[in-house]
Amino acid sequence: MTRFVQIHTLASFPAVLLNRDDAGFAKRLPYGGASRIRVSSQCLKRHWRTVEDEWALSRLDLPMAERSRKAIEMAVMPKLGALAPDIAEAIETSLTVSLYGKDAKKTPSSRQALLLGHVELEYLVRLAQEAAATGSAAAATKLLAEKFARGEGKSNLRALTDGAALPAGLEGALFGRMVTSDPDANTEAAIHVAHAFTVHAEEAESDYFTVVDDLTREAGEAGTAGIFETELTSGLFYGYVVVDVPGLVDNLGGDRALAGRVVRHLLHLIATVSPGAKRGSTAPYAYAELMLVELGTRQPRSLAGAFRSPVPKAGDVLAGALGALGGHLERLDAAYGAREQRAALCCAAAALPGVEAPRPLDALADWAAAAVQAG
């Protein structure tokens, strides 16, 4: 039985700034006595969620979701048509407070960016229309308060949309959802994503550049319109993703065939979709040079320990990383037993225990999907 699908990747990026901190520098991670360049799990998931290509999640033709702090103002109220100002204000305030908390109307910037499924948004529109039909602001407020009230016999957002397929959208079913104002609406993530980091010590430089003013330069002036500085980094990144198969099947309404299709799409996305920061100036696109997939029943474990000692930057870094990964796997297998099934895509020669000949991405994704579908 396949309880967990573990996905390990190595991907190389030169001269990029994939994920920035609040000061505009690359995110970093201290590990094994060396500073590494890091890409956050939130950044990775965001790009996998929203990319539009052959393997996009939207191609599964399932209800999706929107993450926003202004879902009521931008996704509900515009669909209500013309309303009396006092009724519109009452509906907007009541729904906003119910979803985002008691202070949400006064301080919109402090709201949680809430993930709401299209099913839930459509329900909220219908609920708002029902409130508008009461004909008064007081009656509309009372109706909405009753719908979202706590206590025996009352319902929360999750219960109100109970029975609907993927009420929190496919994204909620995959990556989970936390609703601080409505804990019963929380969804446990079925896909667990680690922060990616460079297998070697950080490589970074400060990029100094100028902007040229074409028109003033043609007029005989110096033509400099600004002097700027940004950070650029390079590295071979280790990524790690775990699919909790029973959790995924449960979140998808028990549909194991659909869970297999999701895993097939996910493997393609992980292997081929890159974080997209500074696209115009760095073209930060790369495919994974290694994707190792493990199927098993035991608790997952990251292989990040293979890179606790940074891979030397002199020589072939990919070969060094593959050697470190293979050696780490051999030691784990010797200590705990080799119980997982393994298959891999690899763009270089590698000796990974339990892995036969490398597979192309389509075959690797089909293999994992079939295991999930078979249970």
Image (tube, helix red, strand yellow):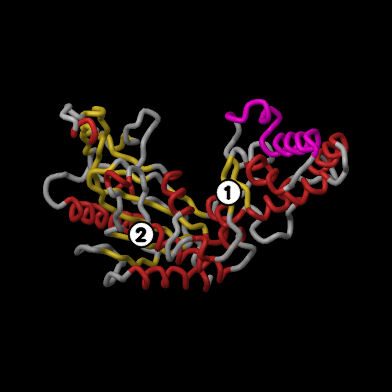
Q: How many marks?
A: 2
Is residue 206 at all visible to an observer of this figure? no
* Mark 2, secondary structure of its residue: helix
- Residue type at mark 2 is Ala
Q: Is residue 241 above or below residue 210?
A: below
Magenta stretch holds residue 94? yes
Q: Main secondary structure of the magenta part?
A: helix
Relative placement, left or right, of 191 versus 44 is: right
Which residue is disc 1 drawn over? 66
Residue 336 drawn above or below residue 178: below
Q: Secondary structure at mark 1?
A: strand
Image x and y of residue 213, in percent: 24, 33
For label 2, the residue is: 271
Q: Nearer the viewer, residue 20 or 82?
A: 82
Give coordinates of residue 153: x percent, y percent.
85, 46
The numbered dot on residue 328 is: none
- What residue is at 23 percent from the left and 56 percent from the top? 322
Residue 212 seen in the current view = yes
Which stretch did the figure color magenta? 84-110
Q: Which residue is at the front of the view, 284 or 43?
A: 284
First along the sequence among labels 2 and 1 = 1
